Amino acid sequence: MANDRIEKQIELKAPVARVWRALTDYREFGEWFRVKLEGPFVPGQTARGNITWPGYEHVVWEAVVQKMEPERLFSFTWHPYSVDPKADYSKETPTLVEFRLEATANGTLLTLTESGFDKVPAARREEAFLRNDGGWAQQMENIEAHVAKA
Amino acid sequence: MLQRPSGGAGRRRGGSLRDGAQVFAALGDETRLALVAKLCRGEPLSISELTQSTASGRMTRQAVTKHLRVLERVGMVRCVRAGRERRFEFNPAPVEEMREYLEFVSAKWDEALGRLQAFVEE
């Protein structure tokens, strides 16, 4: 019936080392994830920075780095789409995000899993939706701008 | 490409929704899952009907009542009265809501991974 995890796979036409850098170098991560991180990712420590999406620059993004096994596994815990600056998310159980890398003939197979949604409070899920209603138009513009640049 | 989670039926305001954890816990029991499966067919059922329909066939009224209470508490089942008889019906809102939330987060990852792909392949 219901499921409490997300799993995605994508094959990237780039070597594992390149993908690893894009995931774990805080500046590179920030480029595609749209967050301006204050410093490097360190296991056991909180990574923090302001979101760089227009309209969301006031929102601080936070994640606690769990594992960094070079070119194999990068993971962190976070509170997905917790964008209310006034809310205290620290009492809520975070979800776990894992990026797994595997070399293939053409590049890298990236497997992303996010698990632990059964612990996300209902109120938070509603909030993500409500905020998203206003956010979609902005996101479309973002993607359009990105595509136009490429 | 971008997909807005469809429908809004599961996103009800107010206090009827409970934590996802409780919904999952409520479903994490074979008997309750069997009761939900039976109620999912749409028609409200009485306790006697539900007692007959459990997989084991040996459920007592008390046991069925107890399991229905758990499902009621998380909002998955609600009691409707038909005259003097109490019937129970399935309420899909909590399950729907969880599914929609996962779809939302999932769509966000599609976007992020798309940007990552553009970033490393350029």
Image: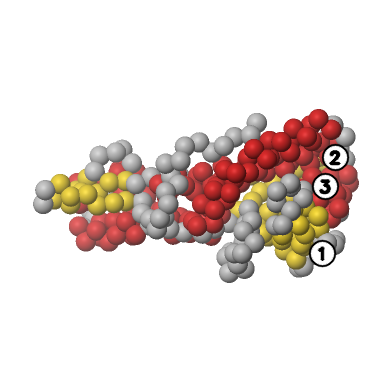
Residue marked by disc 1:
A42
What amino acid type should be assigned to the residue bearing mark 2?
Val
What amino acid type should be assigned to the residue bearing mark 1?
Val
Residue B80 left/right relative to B36: left
Residue A60 left/right relative to A118: right
Q: Which residue is rendered at x = 32% and y = 46% of the image?
A: B90
Q: How much space separates mark 3 and mark 1, taking CA atoms?
A: 18 Å
Residue B96 picture location, percent across and down: 45, 44
Q: Secondary structure at mark 3?
A: helix
Check the picture and name the quadrant holding the N terminus of chain B: top right
**Label annotation for residue B120:** 2
Q: How much space separates mark 2 and mark 3, taking CA atoms?
A: 11 Å
Label 1 chain ID: A
Q: Which residue is rendered at x = 49% and y = 56% of the image?
A: A122
Residue A39 picture location, percent across and down: 85, 62
**Label annotation for residue A31:** 3
Of residues B120 and A148, the one drawn nearer to the viewer in this rendering: A148
Residue A120 picture location, percent across and down: 54, 58
Q: Which residue is rendered at x = 21% and y = 61% of the image?
A: B62
Camera-near label (2 vs 3) is 3
Of callouts 3 and 1, which one flags the residue occurring earlier in the amino acid sequence?
A: 3
Of residues A54 and B19, the one drawn nearer to the viewer in this rendering: A54
What amino acid type should be assigned to the residue bearing mark 3?
Glu
Whether pointer 2 and pointer 1 mark residues with C-beta atoms closer than 8 Å, the reply is no
Q: Secondary structure at mark 2?
A: helix
